[in-house]
Image: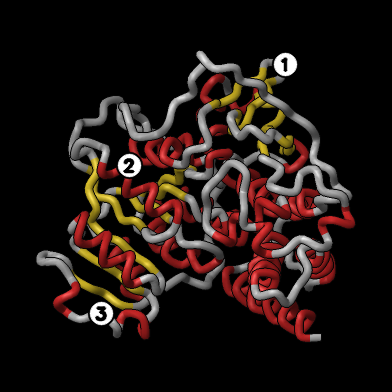
């Protein structure tokens, strides 16, 4: 269970720079993939399959996507399958499960299994705030977590980072932007950083007018120009709320004040993010828009080896374009900057409001432009707490969801 007490006042540290062994033996790492049927999860399994035995699947977990999960089990033969939703798990018969694999059901079972001594690395790829609980359990057990669930740090960043420091756990970013910053930061010292610049594709509506944005349909918003992702993150990219959440994540992951965090629109999605140092040097990480590259880096860190990610071909012409985000047409970025600067319960409320607003938009109950409007309203009007416990965060998460439901219902 996620503890509710306030953690001891331990100074947070940027755990992506946690100490690593001078040499890492080539032994098989057992990986627990949480959210294995989603976009990040399926890409993780491609990386594992192409690793030449360096990685193996110990555990695969999904919420209710039983069919795809069983197909993965037959291919990868994990020791454990976890289905969080009990009704979905009840549809599985013993004959469906391959020999040598056991089935566990429910969130408590998942929390227990990710802490087991057999688990070497945990890929946290459950979508939304639902991923906080299992990520917390893994960190509490001192595990190395490859973090794709940005909501963990958006909702409870200071608490999570203090927990990881106390347990000597490590967080390695899987989001392409944060993985890029992690790599670029190694070119200098923390005190030499002037700013972190997160790139954004701009989504499918970068050239739309404000009037046209109000008429956007879910089908249109789900057609991303460069990335193949799940529906929720695809909508977040279209509204640029994903950049808001990534700003907050970067604030805590890299222990960087909000005033040193910026966003730039880069439609080609080749430069995944940049670090500017005080001498004016800009260090960027480049690569095709392929999640397998940051996933493998998080699994193999501090080593690198050949993998299945696509490569840039500089024999073909390549033009890179950058422009500032338009705060009038895409106000979500400004909300992320506000929440990163204010801290406290701001990230939790912004994230919860966005999750419910996106769900309402996909169901046809909310306009595209209402997503950021409603999130901004709750961000500024909620009963803010500057130093919340996890109980406070979970309570305001529920409050924000109810407020969105009430607003949509009206």
| C-alpha separation, residue under disc 1 versus residue under disc 3 | 58 Å
Residue 371 drawn at (x, y percent): 76, 65
Q: Which of the pair 360/377 is nearer the observer?
A: 360
Is residue 241 rendered to the left or right of residue 142? right
Query: Label 2: few (<14), some or many (≥20) within 10 Å?
Result: many
Residue 112 drawn at (x, y percent): 31, 69
Residue 398 drawn at (x, y percent): 64, 78
Residue at numbered disc 3:
92
Dot label at residue 280: 1
Instruction: Describe the element under mark 2 as helix, strand or loop.
Output: helix
Instruction: Describe the element under mark 1 as helix, strand or loop.
Output: loop
Query: Label 1: few (<14), some or many (≥20) within 10 Å?
Result: few
**Going 61% across and 34% down the picture, which residue do you hit?**
269
Quarter of the figure that contains the C terminus: bottom right
Relative to residue 60, is residue 275 depicted above or below?
above
Task: Give residue 226's quadrant in the image.
Answer: top right
Q: Earlier in the sequence, mark 2 or mark 3?
A: 2
Instruction: Describe the element under mark 3 as helix, strand or loop.
Output: loop
């Amino acid at each position: 269970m996620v503890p509710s007490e306030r953690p001891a006042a331990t100074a947070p540290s940027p755990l992506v720079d946690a100490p690593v062994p001078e040499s890492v033996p080539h032994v098989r790492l057992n990986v627990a993939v949480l959210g294995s049927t989603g976009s990040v999860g399926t890409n993780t399994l491609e990386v594992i399959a192409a690793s030449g035995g360096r990685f193996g699947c110990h555990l695969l977990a999904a919420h209710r996507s039983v069919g795809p999960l069983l197909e993965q089990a037959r291919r990868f033969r994990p020791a454990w399958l976890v289905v969080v939703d009990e009704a979905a798990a009840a549809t599985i018969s013993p004959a469906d499960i391959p020999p040598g694999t056991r089935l566990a059901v429910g969130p408590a079972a998942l929390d227990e299994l990710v802490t087991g001594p057999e688990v070497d690395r945990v890929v946290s790829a459950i979508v939304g705030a639902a991923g906080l609980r299992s990520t917390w359990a893994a960190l509490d057990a001192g595990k190395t977590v490859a973090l794709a669930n940005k909501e963990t740090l958006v909702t409870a960043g200071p608490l999570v980072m203090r927990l990881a420091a106390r347990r000597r756990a490590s967080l390695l970013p899987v989001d392409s932007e944060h993985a890029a910053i992690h790599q670029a930061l190694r070119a200098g010292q923390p005190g030499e950083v002037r700013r972190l610049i997160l790139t954004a594709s701009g989504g499918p509506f970068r050239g739309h007018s404000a009037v046209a944005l109000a008429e956007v349909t879910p089908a249109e918003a789900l057609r991303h120009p460069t990335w193949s992702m799940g529906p929720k993150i695809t909508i977040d990219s279209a509204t640029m709320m994903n950049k808001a959440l990534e700003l907050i994540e970067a604030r805590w992951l890299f222990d960087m004040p909000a005033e040193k965090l910026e966003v730039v629109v880069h439609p080609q999605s080749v430069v995944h993010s940049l670090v500017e140092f005080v001498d004016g040097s800009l260090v960027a990480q480049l690569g095709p828009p392929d999640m397998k590259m940051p996933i493998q880096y998080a699994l193999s860190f501090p080593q690198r080896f050949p993998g299945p990610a696509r490569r840039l071909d500089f024999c073909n012409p390549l033009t890179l374009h950058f422009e500032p985000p338009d705060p009038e047409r895409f106000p979500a970025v400004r909300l992320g900057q506000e929440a990163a600067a204010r801290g406290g319960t701001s990230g939790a409320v912004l994230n919860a409001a966005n999750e419910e607003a996106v769900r309402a938009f996909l169901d046809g109950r909310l306009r595209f432009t209402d997503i950021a409007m409603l999130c901004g309203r709750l961000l500024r009007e909620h009963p803010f707490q500057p130093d919340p416990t996890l109980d406070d965060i979970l309570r305001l998460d529920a409050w924000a969801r109810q407020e969105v439901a009430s607003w949509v219902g009206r």
